[in-house]
Image (cartoon, rainbow, N blue to C red):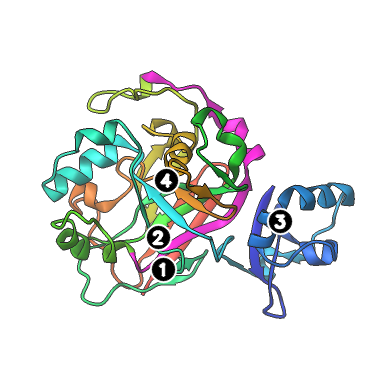
C-alpha cells in the first residue's frame, strides 16, 4: 500500500492511499480511520484490519485534484546514517578527509531537523549566502513500533514502511562545521524532503535479495556483516539531466543494522521515527566536486526517484 498525506479540495489535510492516479481518503472510507499519518502509524495494526474489512474502496479524488504533502509531516525524530561506502569515499576526498576506521565497525548517524520537513513539489529555500547547495539521494525507513536494544536479526518487523529522502545540504556551511569534530549541523538544518508516499514494508519485500558480494567492486569493500538488501534503482535528476543512477543493494549497512545501533543502550525507537540510509554512491554533487553539475541555484528542479516508491520533486528558490 502507498500511503499519502494530502490537501483535499477544501484545503484540509487528510491521509489516504493511492490507487493508480487516484486517492482514497481514509476518513471518507471509514470514520474509524484517522486524518493524520502519525496517529495511523501509532495504531496501524488496528487500522489495517479496518481497511481490510472495507474490501474494495472506490477512490475519492484524482491525484490532479489534491496536493500531496510530506507523507509524515511530523516525525518524532530523524536519524540520518552514512550507509554507502562509495559516498563516504567520494565525499571524504572532496573535503580532504579520510574515512575513520570506526566507520567499518558500526553504522554512524547524526540527528537531523525533524521540524524542517518538506514534501512533493515544495519549494526549498537556499540558505542565505550559501554558495554550494547540494542534494543527497537516500532511501528512508519509518519505524512502526516501539522497541529498545533491538538485534539486527529481529529488526525487520519494526519497520513500518519506506519513502524517498532528499537530505538537502549547504556544503559551504558544512565545510566550515566539519573542521570542528562536533560535526555537520547547520549545514543540514534547513530542509529534509520526503515523499511522495510511504510504501508499506510488506510491498517492498518483493525487492529483497541476499547480500550480493559481486556488486562490491574495488574500491568499495564487501560488508563485514551480510544481511539482505533491496535491489532497487535510485536515480537523481536536475532540470531533467540524470545525475546519478545507483542501487540500494550497494549499501554497506542495511536498515536492520541501523536499527540495532540506534536502539542500543536502552534507547527506545518510537513509531514515527525516521532513519535515513545515507547517500547512495554518486548521489550528491560534492562527490564529483560539483563537476557533473554546478551548485544548485534558484529555479533548479530536482527529482529523486526510487524504484517501487516514486518520484520526489522539489524546486530551489
Q: Nearer the viewer, residue 294 or 115?
A: 115
Which residue does the image show at 22% across and 38% down from the upper left?
A: 89
Q: Is residue 247 left or right of residue 197?
A: left
Q: Earlier in the sequence, mark 1 or mark 2?
A: 2
Contact (CB < 8 A) between labels 2 and 4?
no
Examine the structure image and report whether residue 194 is included in the region drawn in magenta.
yes
| Label 3 residue SS | strand
Instruction: Give the residue at mark 1.
Output: 315
Give the residue at mark 4.
Answer: 235
What is the number of the mark on residue 302? 2
* Mark 3 / mark 4, whichever is N-terminal: 3
Distance Cα–Cα, label 2 vs label 3 = 24 Å
Give the alpha-carbon distance from disc 3 to disc 1, as whole Å. Answer: 25 Å
Extent of the magenta region: 189-213
Q: Among all residues in the image, which is located at the extreme left?
A: 96
Q: Is residue 69 visible?
A: yes
Tell how many labels.
4
Quarter of the figure that contains the C terminus: bottom left
Q: Height in image: 64 above or below 286?
A: below
Q: Element at badge 4?
A: strand
Q: Tell me how far mark 1 sits from mark 2, CA to CA.
A: 6 Å
Say which of marks 2 and 3 sits in front: 3
Q: Residue at x 43, y 21 (%)?
A: 212
Q: Which residue lies under the disc numbered 3?
A: 17
Query: Residue 196 at what x, y percent from top left?
Result: 56, 57
* Within-10-Å neighbours for mark 1: few <14, some 14–19, many 20+: many
Q: CA distance from mark 3 to mark 4?
A: 24 Å
In x, y percent, where is residue 3?
A: 66, 54
Q: Residue at x 33, y 43 (%)?
A: 108
User: Does dot 1 land on a helix, a strand or a loop?
Assistant: strand
Amino acid at each position: 500500500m502507498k500511503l499519502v498525506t494530502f490537501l483535499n479540495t477544501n484545503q484540509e489535510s487528510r491521509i489516504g492511499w493511492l490507487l493508480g492516479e487516484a486517492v482514497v481518503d481514509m476518513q471518507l472510507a471509514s470514520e474509524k480511520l484517522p486524518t493524520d499519518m502519525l496517529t495511523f502509524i501509532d495504531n496501524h495494526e488496528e487500522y489495517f484490519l479496518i481497511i481490510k474489512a472495507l474490501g474494495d474502496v472506490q477512490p475519492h479524488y484524482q491525484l490532479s485534484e489534491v496536493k500531496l504533502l510530506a507523507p509524515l509531516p511530523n516525525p518524532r525524530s530523524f536519524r540520518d546514517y552514512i550507509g554507502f561506502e562509495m559516498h563516504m569515499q567520494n565525499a571524504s576526498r572532496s573535503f580532504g578527509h579520510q574515512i575513520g576506521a570506526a566507520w567499518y565497525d558500526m553504522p554512524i548517524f547524526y540527528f537531523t531537523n525533524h521540524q524542517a520537513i518538506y514534501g512533493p513539489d515544495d519549494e526549498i529555500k537556499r540558505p542565505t549566502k550559501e554558495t554550494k547547495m547540494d542534494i543527497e539521494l537516500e532511501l528512508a525507513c519509518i519505524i512502526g513500533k516501539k522497541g529498545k536494544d533491538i538485534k539486527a536479526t529481529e529488526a525487520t518487523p519494526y519497520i513500518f514502511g519506506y519513502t524517498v529522502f532528499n537530505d538537502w545540504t549547504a556544503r559551504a556551511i558544512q565545510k566550515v562545521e566539519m573542521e570542528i569534530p562536533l560535526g555537520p549541523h547547520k549545514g543540514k538544518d534547513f530542509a529534509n524532503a520526503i515523499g511522495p508516499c510511504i510504501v508499506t514494508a510488506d510491498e517492498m519485500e518483493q525487492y529483497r535479495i541476499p547480500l550480493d558480494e559481486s556488486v562490491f567492486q574495488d574500491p568499495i569493500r564487501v560488508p563485514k556483516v551480510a544481511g539482505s538488501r533491496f535491489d532497487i534503482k535510485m536515480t537523481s535528476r536536475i532540470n531533467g539531466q540524470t545525475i546519478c543512477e545507483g542501487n540500494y543493494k550497494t549499501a554497506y549497512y542495511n536498515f536492520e543494522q541501523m536499527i540495532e545501533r540506534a536502539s542500543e543502550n536502552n534507547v527506545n525507537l518510537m513509531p514515527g521515527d525516521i532513519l535515513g540510509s545515507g547517500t547512495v554512491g554518486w548521489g550528491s554533487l560534492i562527490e564529483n566536486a560539483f563537476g557533473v553539475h554546478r551548485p544548485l541555484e534558484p529555479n533548479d528542479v530536482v527529482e529523486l526517484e526510487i524504484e517501487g516508491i516514486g518520484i520526489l520533486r522539489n524546486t530551489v528558490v
